[in-house]
């Protein structure tokens, strides 16, 4: 009696899951309907345009960082010229100072210059690292766009999208 009841329940489960299995078979078969293919193509186009917009944003960021780096270099060169001029003035003023005072003044000037150079060098390294990170992100976005274009041309949409992989 118990075995008969279990068999009846198994048959009922099988009959209830039959429409679900048919749906899965239709979805995963290669013969997708035109409506499904159009949906997937539209989704891939959306992903492509989203990636293009991200790439444009990255280009803008790269241009900003490049501009910032150029400004930094220009400011650094200006400071170097100013420091050289200051050193020239110190050398002219040294005529009235004792040798000990001149030496202390030189040391202060050297340390000040070394601190400024160190600070600017650290800043340039951080800007260069940031620029390198943005270039890596940009190359990744380009590779993704090329892959999407290849998929669109090869399969005409194919019913698969990158987020499913």
Image (spheres, helix red, strand yellow):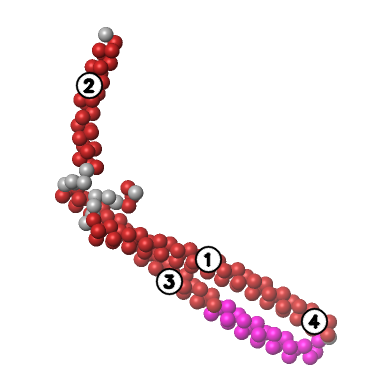
Could you say which is closer to the camera, residue 139 or residue 11? Answer: 11
Nearer the camera: disc 3 or disc 4 = 3
Mark with earlier residue (1, 2)? 2
Q: Is residue 59 left or right of residue 158?
A: right
The answer to which of 139 and 95 lies nearer the viewer is: 139
* Place of residue 131 in the rendered image (x, y in percent of width and height, measured from the top left): 48, 67
Q: Among all residues in the image, which is located at the extreme top?
A: 1
Q: Which residue is mark 2?
A: 12
| Residue tagged 1 | 129
Q: Is residue 65 above or below residue 151?
A: below
> How crowded is the residue under tag 1: few (<14 C-alpha within 10 Å), some, or many (20+)?
few
Find disc 4 in the rendering and name its residue: 103
Q: CA distance from mark 1 to mark 3?
A: 15 Å
Secondary structure under the numbered disc 2 in the rendered image: helix
Q: Earlier in the sequence, mark 2 or mark 3?
A: 2
> For mark 3, what is the residue?
63
Left or right, residue 129 beside residue 145: right
Magenta segment: 74-97
Going 24% across and 23% down the picture, which residue do you hit?
A: 13
- Choose mark 4 or mark 1, whichever is in front: 1
User: Residue 42 lies in what quarter of the image?
Assistant: bottom left
């Amino acid at each position: 009696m118990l075995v008969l009841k279990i068999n009846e329940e198994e048959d009922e489960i099988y009959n209830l899951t039959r429409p679900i299995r048919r749906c899965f078979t239709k979805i995963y078969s290669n013969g997708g309907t035109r409506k499904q293919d159009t949906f997937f193509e539209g989704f891939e186009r959306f992903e492509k345009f989203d990636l293009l917009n991200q790439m444009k944003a990255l280009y803008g960021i790269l241009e900003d960082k490049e501009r910032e780096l150029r400004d930094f270099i220009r400011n650094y060169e200006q400071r170097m010229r100013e420091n050289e001029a200051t050193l020239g003035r110190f050398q002219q003023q040294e005529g009235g100072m004792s040798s000990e005072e001149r030496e202390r003044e030189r040391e202060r000037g050297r340390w000040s210059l070394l601190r400024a150079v160190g600070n600017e060098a650290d800043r340039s390294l951080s800007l260069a690292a940031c620029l390198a990170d943005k270039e890596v992100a940009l190359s990744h976005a380009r590779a993704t766009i090329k892959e999407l274009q290849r998929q669109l041309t090869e399969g005409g949409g194919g019913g698969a999208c990158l987020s499913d992989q």
